[in-house]
Image (cartoon, coloured by chain):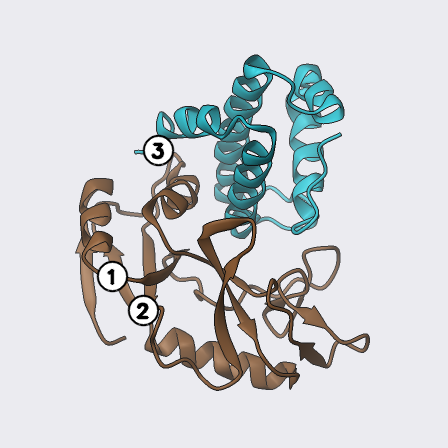
């Protein structure tokens, strides 16, 4: 199970957006952990989709986890996922997917 | 702010940062305080006087902040660490300027504050407290750090 400890609110953020997107595949990866390159790619792609939605929700003043602005959690999300991908040996996949998502 | 620079694209920003030396940097959406957070009263993310509970080691009554060399505000020390944090702020339909605030690692921090390398990531640092202090004192010191930080302004986006 993937569980973030330094910034525990990131677990709540994941849960909210997994539910919102109805993404059973990511839900399963969060339960089993990243076990191969395919999991790592799917999780990385999902995270950037989640990032965009966090920003959209702030723009549209949609309340999530008690606040209409969760953009200040983005550095925590970046920190936790980089740390996790490093630990499981798939940082290069996170890096590659992320490079394609920054302008 | 002692110095003002501007960037129009990620390559500009990367180049400017590479010329700074040993920087410690944090991005912030323009209009937001770089070191203090909007107040949030409940949950794991809550704050005390703009300081997040998750960032520092608090006393039980939450009036004091206690030293811990792996607890503190998060700062990037390399482009590879900073670029995705910046990218996350920037990934939005209606662009908002995202400025980069920085201070040199050897800069004169207020007493009781120190940058400590993250044991889990050498390109990441925590702005830690080295002695117990009241939360009001920490807030004042973080404001002093903000005042001493230089900014690289995002000049390529408009609200």
| Cα separation between marks 1 and 2 | 7 Å
The answer to whether B118 is drawn above or below residue B129 in the figure is: above
Measuring from the top left, give residue A95's x and y in whole percent.
42, 30
Which numbered disc covers residue B21?
A: 1
C-beta proximity under 8 Å, tags 1 and 3: no
Which numbered disc covers residue B104?
A: 2
Extreme residue in the right direction = B60
Judge by depth and name the residue closer to the eye, A62 or B17: B17
Q: Who's the residue at 74% across and 22% down the image?
A: A32
* Chain identity for the colour brown used in the image: B
The image quarter containing residue B130 is bottom right
* Chain identity for the colour cyan used in the image: A
Measuring from the top left, give residue B97's x and y in whole percent.
31, 50
The answer to whether B134 is drawn above or below residue A93 in the figure is: below
Which of disc 2 and disc 1 is earlier in sequence?
A: 1
Is disc 2 surrounded by few (<14), some (14 to 19) or many (20+) residues within 10 Å? some
Which numbered disc covers residue A102?
A: 3
Mark 3 vs mark 2: give the one in front. 2
Q: Are marks 1 and 2 on the same chain?
A: yes
C-beta proximity under 8 Å, tags 1 and 2: yes
* Drawn side of residue A13 relative to residue B98, left or right: right
Chain bearing mark 2: B
Which numbered disc covers residue B112?
A: none
Task: Name the quadrant of the N terminus of chain A.
Answer: top right
* Drawn side of residue A53 relative to residue B146, left or right: right
Measuring from the top left, give residue B31's x and y in whole percent.
39, 62
| Cα separation between marks 1 and 3 | 24 Å
Q: Who's the residue at 20% across and 71% down the image?
A: B3
Mark 1 vs mark 3: give the one in front. 1
Measuring from the top left, give residue B137's x and y in whole percent.
58, 86
> Which SS class for mark 1?
loop
């Amino acid at each position: 199970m993937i569980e973030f400890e330094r910034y525990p609110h990131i677990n709540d953020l994941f849960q909210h957006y997994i539910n919102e997107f109805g993404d059973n595949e990511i839900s399963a990866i969060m339960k089993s952990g990243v076990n191969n390159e395919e999991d790592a790619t799917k999780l990385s792609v999902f995270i950037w989709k989640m990032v965009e939605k966090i920003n959209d929700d702030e723009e549209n003043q949609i309340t999530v986890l008690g606040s209409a602005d969760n953009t200040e959690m983005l550095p925590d999300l970046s920190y936790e996922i980089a740390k996790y991908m490093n630990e499981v040996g798939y940082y290069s996949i996170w890096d590659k997917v992320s490079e394609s998502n920054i302008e | 702010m002692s110095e003002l620079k501007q960037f129009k694209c990620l390559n500009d920003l990367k180049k400017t940062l590479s010329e700074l030396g040993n920087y410690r940097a944090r991005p912030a959406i323009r209009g937001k305080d770089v070191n203090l957070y909007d107040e949030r009263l409940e949950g794991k993310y809550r704050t005390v006087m703009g300081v997040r509970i998750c960032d520092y080691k608090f006393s039980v009554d939450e009036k004091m902040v206690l030293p811990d060399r792996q607890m503190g505000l998060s700062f990037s020390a390399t482009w590879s660490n900073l670029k995705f944090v910046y990218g996350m702020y920037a990934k939005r339909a209606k662009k908002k300027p995202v400025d980069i605030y920085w201070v040199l690692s050897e800069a004169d921090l207020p007493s009781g504050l120190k940058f400590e390398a993250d044991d889990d990531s050498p390109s990441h640092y925590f702005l830690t407290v080295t002695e117990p202090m009241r939360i009001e004192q920490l807030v004042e010191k973080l404001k002093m750090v903000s005042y001493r930080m230089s900014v690289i302004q995002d000049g390529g986006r408009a609200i």
